[in-house]
């Protein structure tokens, strides 16, 4: 199926693994990251007859998100059989309980919501608007969510709230755009820089710290490559999109 795919946060972790696999499978791949180049993806694409287009952008800056949307217009107006957007870029934001989330962190809180939800809403809205004109094409959106969207963790007020907002937005977008398949997908606990950041946090701020240290010590973290393979395989299944809120560990 001739495919145009787009992955945000594509320079490392799960986003990089998704982009590297898509570079082997699709006809045009758009990657977005703060870094100016994603060399491994470009190398794979060049050997796979995949057109790779990379945009350097900080998606916590909404002015850059707006500029990115304009650049996507000519690409997404190209008729193909399948359009896939994976909103992967995200951040934990400040890890602190209520007494730590005061005015000194207000800018960090705003940046977290910009990246985790505001940019997703803007990009997805633009993507759906452009793709709607392509009759009979398969239009898919995967928003990388988290178990933190569906469970409360002390110290993760900002992260939990932003990912819960992502889940609810995905449900609304699916109601509004029945021509598309929109899934907010929890990917499980993956061995990424985000996990390293969690393990370096303060137990006073994040009481569940030991659990994440134990997962790492017991080699219970999923690899980015394995998780990316599962996500992309799921996107090709006949039942993809039937459940907006999903968890890759339960599929």
Image (cartoon, rainbow, N blue to C red):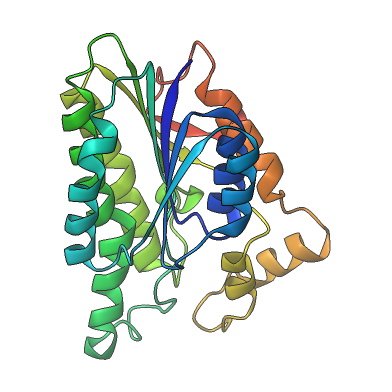
Q: Where is residue 199 drawn, in percent x and y?
A: 64, 74
Q: Compared with residue 118, is residue 124 higher up or lower down, i.e. above or below? A: above
Q: Is 46 in front, or is 184? A: 46
Count numbered badges in the picture.
0
- Is residue 249 among the parts visible in the rendering? no
Q: Quadrant of residue 110?
A: bottom left
Left or right, 76 with respect to 53, comes to left
Q: Compared with residue 132, is residue 197 higher up or lower down, i.e. above or below? A: below
Left or right, 99 with respect to 222, comes to left
Left or right, 3 with respect to 21, comes to left
Q: Where is residue 193 drawn, in percent x and y?
A: 61, 68
Q: Where is residue 36 drawn, in percent x and y?
A: 44, 67
Q: Is 44 in front, or is 112? A: 44
Q: Is 39 in front, or is 134? A: 39
Q: On the rendered image, what quadrant is the C terminus found in?
A: top right
Residue at 82% of width from left, 57% of height from top?
219
Residue sticking out furthest to the bottom: 104
Residue at 71% of width from left, 48% of height from top?
222
Q: Quadrant of residue 229?
A: top right
Q: Compared with residue 57, is residue 103 higher up or lower down, i.e. above or below? A: below
Residue sticking out furthest to the right: 218
Q: Compared with residue 187, is residue 242 higher up or lower down, i.e. above or below? A: above
Residue at 39% of width from left, 63% of height from top?
159
Q: Where is residue 72 drawn, in percent x and y?
A: 25, 43
- Is residue 45 among the parts visible in the rendering? yes
Q: Is 235 in front, or is 245? A: 235
């Amino acid at each position: 199926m001739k495919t145009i795919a787009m992955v945000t946060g594509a320079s490392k972790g799960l986003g990089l693994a998704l982009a590297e696999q898509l570079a082997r499978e699709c006809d045009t791949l758009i990657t977005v990251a703060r870094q100016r180049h994603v060399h491994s993806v470009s190398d794979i694409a060049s050997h796979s007859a995949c057109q790779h287009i990379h945009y350097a952008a900080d998606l916590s800056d909404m002015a850059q998100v707006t500029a990115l949307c304009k650049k996507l217009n000519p690409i997404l107006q190209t008729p193909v059989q399948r359009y896939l957007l994976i909103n992967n870029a995200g951040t934990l934001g400040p890890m602190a309980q209520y007494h730590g989330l005061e005015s000194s962190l207000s800018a960090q809180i705003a940046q977290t919501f910009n990246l985790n939800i505001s940019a997703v809403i803007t990009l997805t809205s633009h993507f759906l608007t452009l793709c709607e004109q392509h009759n009979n094409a398969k239009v898919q959106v995967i928003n990388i969510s988290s178990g933190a969207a569906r469970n409360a963790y002390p110290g993760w007020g900002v992260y939990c709230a932003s990912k819960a907002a992502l889940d609810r937005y995905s449900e609304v977008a699916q109601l509004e755009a029945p021509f598309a398949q929109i899934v907010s997908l929890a990917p499980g606990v993956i061995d990424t820089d985000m996990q390293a950041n969690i393990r370096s946090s303060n137990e006073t701020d994040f009481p569940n710290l030991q659990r994440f240290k134990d997962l790492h010590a017991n080699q219970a973290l999923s690899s980015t490559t394995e998780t990316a393979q599962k996500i992309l395989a799921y996107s090709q299944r006949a039942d993809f999109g039937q459940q907006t809120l999903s968890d890759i560990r339960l599929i």
